[in-house]
Image: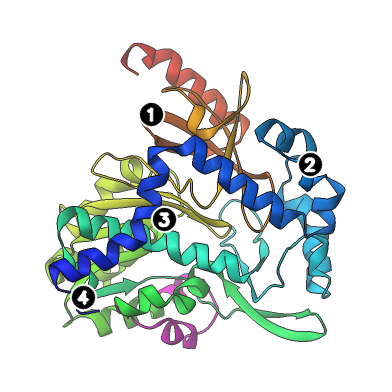
Amino acid sequence: MHLSAKTGADFLKQIVNPWYEALQNPAETQQQVLKNLVERYAKTLYGKKHGALEVKGAADFRANFPKINYKELCPYFEEARRGNHSIFLSEPPVCWVMTRGSTGPAKVFPVTKTHIEQIFACGARALVNYALRKNDFELLTGKILNLNFPSTVTTMDADGQKITYGYSSGTYAKLNPMLNQVSLLPRQEEIDSLGPGITKLDWEKRFELVYEQALNERVVAAMGVTPVILSFARYVKRRHGKKPKDLWSLHALFCTSVRKIQFKYGPVLRKYFGEVPIVEMYSATEGVFAQQLDDLPFITPNYDKYYFEVETSKGSKMLHELERGEWGRLIISSCLFPRYDIGDMIEALGKNYFRVFGRAKTLTILEHRLYRLLFRWFL
């Protein structure tokens, strides 16, 4: 991607402007997103059963559609695998992906054309927003370390055919044209060629491939699952005796897929990569839901693509309705599923800034209540 400052800015603003505009009026944006989603749900047997066409607003949506978790989704995904996608999905799957299994057994999801388009659009926002804010167009012409999981892992029967699928991060990296333009290094196909394993030895082979290809290149960023980025840095130091900051002058780290990135991982990452900005992204196999807007270490939702609700101690609210300090369990509706309980806890920091502080588990909630009790005067 060869961009002059003016031409580049004009082109790139098309990627981030829908996000910026949604932040100006999240209530109106979320109402339109809900309208679009229920029209999509009405094409499915599940949506018809729950009266999708009767939904006029947030209250109707909560009344008609129960929240649903992955375990409850599995029977519908099994039907989609057999070719009966319309029982739950408004489009046929174009591929399948799996999660890392960091909080339990790996989950397997069908992926539709619309879902992939939203992954690409929202995934590009963190990168483009940062380049525009910093007037750093070199970020879009250099090499970005590809530290994703393999996209080719195993096979299954789907609609009478054997299909191969793998981890979502690798699959999205392989399919994403935006990332190809900014030169992922190595290419995802080369990562896949090393095999599907995720043992320590498997990762060392991948890390060595990344190191060898990137050693004499102009590397400007790393993007991927945060613990993997850190593991790569430690591998390079252990195996080659140098830290990444001694080899490359990175402009930013784009970190995903875990909680407390800025505060838990940030100090350690900077030990290896130097005083490089860390741009947080709240992404998962199920979608790219939010990313960092500015230098504040918080995330800002993609209100124009997903519909966000939060179950608080005082009942359900829209995410944008939360006042500073309010928190609860996040429920997300997307083109794939309505009212999905993703299992994360989120807290409002005011002015559309949020932080995901942990999984929706009893210990996490108790720790957060204690934290707020002890530090309430400073919040």
Question: Is 200 in the magenta?
Answer: yes
> Which tag, 2 or 4, sits closer to the chain's start?
2
Mark 2 / mark 3, whichever is N-terminal: 2
Q: Position of residue 79 (x, y in %)?
A: 84, 67
The image position of residue 281, as x and y in percent, is: 39, 52
Disc 2 to disc 3, how far (Cα)?
A: 37 Å
Which dot, 4 or 3, sits closer to the camera? 4
- Name the mark nearer the viewer: 2 or 3: 2
Question: Mark 1 or mark 2: which comes first in sequence?
Answer: 2
Name the N-terminal-most of marks 1 and 4.
4
- The image quadrant of residue 274 is bottom left
Check disc 1 and report its element: helix, strand or loop: strand
Q: Is residue 376 above or below residue 285?
A: above
Q: Which mark is residue 349?
A: 1
What amino acid is found at the position of numbered circle 3 in the picture?
Thr
Vertical placement of 211 versus 121: above or below? Answer: below
Foreground disc of the pair 2, 4: 2
Q: Secondary structure at mark 4?
A: loop
How dense is the environment of label 2, judged by Cα within 10 Å: few (below 14), some, or many (20 and up)? few
- At horizontal 77% and vertical 47% (from top left) the residue drawn is 52
Labels 3, 1: front one: 1
Q: Disc 2 residue type?
A: Glu
Q: Which mark is residue 256?
A: 3
Choose the circle earlier in sequence order: 4 or 3: 4
**Mark 2 → mark 4, Cα distance in angstroms:** 50 Å
Tell me the residue that label 2 is attached to: 54
